[in-house]
Amino acid sequence: MACTCLLAGCGRQPAPAPVEEAQTQTVASPEEGGAVSRAPMATPPAQPVPVPAPVPPPVAGVPDWSPVELVSGQAWIDCRLDYRDGDGEPLSSPSRANLRHLLEPCREGDVLRLRYRGKIASDFTTLVERVTRVADSLGIGSRVLDLDSTGGQVEDAIRTGDLIGGNRWTIWVREDSVCHSACVFVLAGGDSRRLAGRVGIHRIIRLSSTATSRTELNTELQAVYATVRAYLERNGASPLLADVMKTVPNRSLRLLTGDELQVYGLDGNNAAQDDLDRVRLLDKCGDDFMRRRDAWVRAFDERCRGQAEVFALNSCGLQLRRDFGFPDDDCPAESPLAEFNELPEAALPTAVPEQVTGDATATGEATDAPVTAAATAGEAAPVPAGHGG
């Protein structure tokens, strides 16, 4: 009998590793931010709706410099990347003259940081487009969108993401910030993403719907989700994210874990841009450069992803890139964290806190206070007023 028990014990499979439980929270009003769709339907709801064609990036069109006021949020322009020193000069009117005045000092360091806190709407899209245009005209190659948003209009988020795609934008969601609902679509468009704050999703809301039944509303939503899936695919993110969004009631918010953010293609380097760059960089920078670049990406994911602050993520990455011979002498602009290339050594972030355990992206508190060890270890954190999805 004892031998039989021993043999049974030897054949027993080890217990599976615990799976991180998805977190959800209730939001006060899904219309405040959220993921709202107002686009008119091209055909009557009772008929099958074809997948709409992708919206072309606004930057490719004719420049429109008509007066626009920022009413959906607040914005700042800074030529420094260390946000601990503040967010720079406030920007209320994105006129060409005003943007040129604010961005001119950024030419020296070849980097700008656009801090935005507010809803995703058409004035936000216009802001990003105009900053991109002026940065191009001034030769500022590195751009950081420092984002804090509870969401907004789905169609404007998609237009912004397509605009950002391929225009050398890195997106930050700091430890004191969030990116909820429609904001996630903006996140998908960035060339690179550095995340420490909370990222959450829920169902898309059709506020302009004329549907009178679930069937009609579902037909409208199918068209919206088809647009979303096509957008995610062309920007290197997983279309499965759209299906997950459908399962979350619009008065709830599902907070994505760090592993989910990577699986859905919302964290780190953009896969679509990475594939596009690979062909060009192999020819321009050579095999050795690409091997070192790929090794740096793997090391960054392994050693830096658990940091609870964007500042610490950058510090860890900069320390790693020295170990891999970056910035490269022949291809400095293509090197990892190239936005830091022109900064003097004394201005580079160097203080790397101890590696934290757990998933800082999913569980770090979205407050103005520093993230505590308890929060990074997995405790649920309160969401401040105004950060509903």
Image (tube, helix red, strand yellow):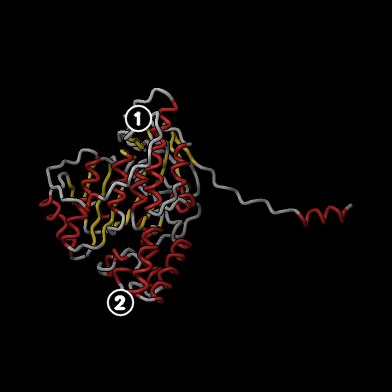
Q: Is residue 107 left or right of residue 82?
A: left
Vertical relation: 204 (above or below) 233 = above
**Amino acid at pointer 1:** Pro
The residue sitting at 60% across, 48% down in the picture is 18
Which secondary structure lies at badge 2?
Answer: loop
Q: Earlier in the sequence, mark 1 or mark 2?
A: 1
Whole-number angstrom distance, CA of label 1 to CA of label 2: 57 Å
Check the picture and name the quadrant holding the C terminus: top left
**Amino acid at pointer 2:** Asp
Q: Residue furthest left?
A: 97
Vertical relation: 386 (above or below) 230 = above
* Res 340 quadrant in image: bottom left
Count of number-bearing discs: 2
The residue sitting at 44% across, 40% down in the picture is 245
324, 306: nearer the viewer: 324
Q: Are marks 1 and 2 in contact (CB under 8 Å)?
A: no
The residue sitting at 24% across, 41% down in the picture is 122
Vertical relation: 273 (above or below) 322 = above
Which secondary structure lies at badge 1?
Answer: loop
Which label sits in the foreground, 1 or 2?
1
Residue 330: which numbered mark, if any? Answer: 2
1, 227: nearer the viewer: 227
Q: Position of residue 283 (x, y in %)?
A: 35, 74
Q: Position of residue 217 (x, y in %)?
A: 40, 29
Mark 1, Cα crowd under 10 Å, few <14 / some 14-19 / many 20+, is: few
Q: Position of residue 202 (x, y in %)?
A: 42, 37
Q: Residue furthest top?
A: 212
Q: Is residue 104 left or right of residue 273?
A: left
Residue 44: which numbered mark, if any? Answer: 1
The residue sitting at 43% across, 63% down in the picture is 300
Vertical relation: 300 (above or below) 361 = below
Q: Position of residue 254 (x, y in %)?
A: 45, 40
